[in-house]
Image (cartoon, rainbow, N blue to C red):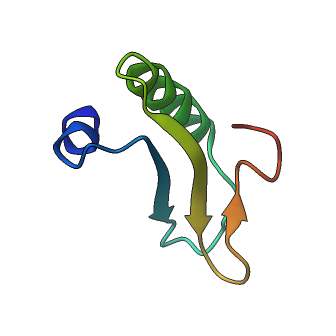
Amino acid sequence: MVKRALDYNAAALILCHNHPSGSAEPSIADRKMTKVLQKALEMVDVRVLDHIIVGEGDPLSMAEYGWI
């Protein structure tokens, strides 16, 4: 993720993935991985603006819940 952000000279990014189960609720692993990615990207001055999880119904925005 860090390499790709640097390849594109990104200042910020939005993470997004789907849950085939249909639930847009983030798992504990989703929340931990988001924090790991945030810390890694901070080291190269790239901000994570949001992490969106897509399932059935409305997507969930971690930023809206204050998790980012």
On screen, residue 42 above or below 27: above
Q: Please identify the quadrant where the N terminus is shown.
A: top left
Q: How many marks?
A: 0
Can you give x and y, in whole percent of width and height, for residue 14 in the image? 50, 54
Query: Residue placed farthest to the bottom in the image?
Result: 57
Can you give x and y, in whole percent of width and height, for residue 31 in the image? 61, 36
On screen, residue 20 above or below 1: below
User: On the picture, is 40 further left or further right than 25?
Assistant: left
On screen, residue 18 above or below 29: below
Residue at 67% x, 72% y: name it: 59
Query: Residue placed farthest to the top in the image?
Result: 43
Q: Quadrant of residue 41?
A: top left
Q: Please identify the quadrant where the C terminus is shown.
A: top right
Residue at 48% x, 53% y: name it: 15
Residue at 55% x, 27% y: name it: 35
User: On the picture, is 17 further left or further right than 56?
Assistant: left
Can you give x and y, in whole percent of width and height, for residue 5 in the image? 28, 42
On screen, residue 58 above or below 37: below
In the image shown, does 56 or 40 lie closer to the viewer? 40
Can you give x and y, in whole percent of width and height, for residue 50 in the image? 61, 50
In the image shown, does 7 or 57 lie closer to the viewer? 7
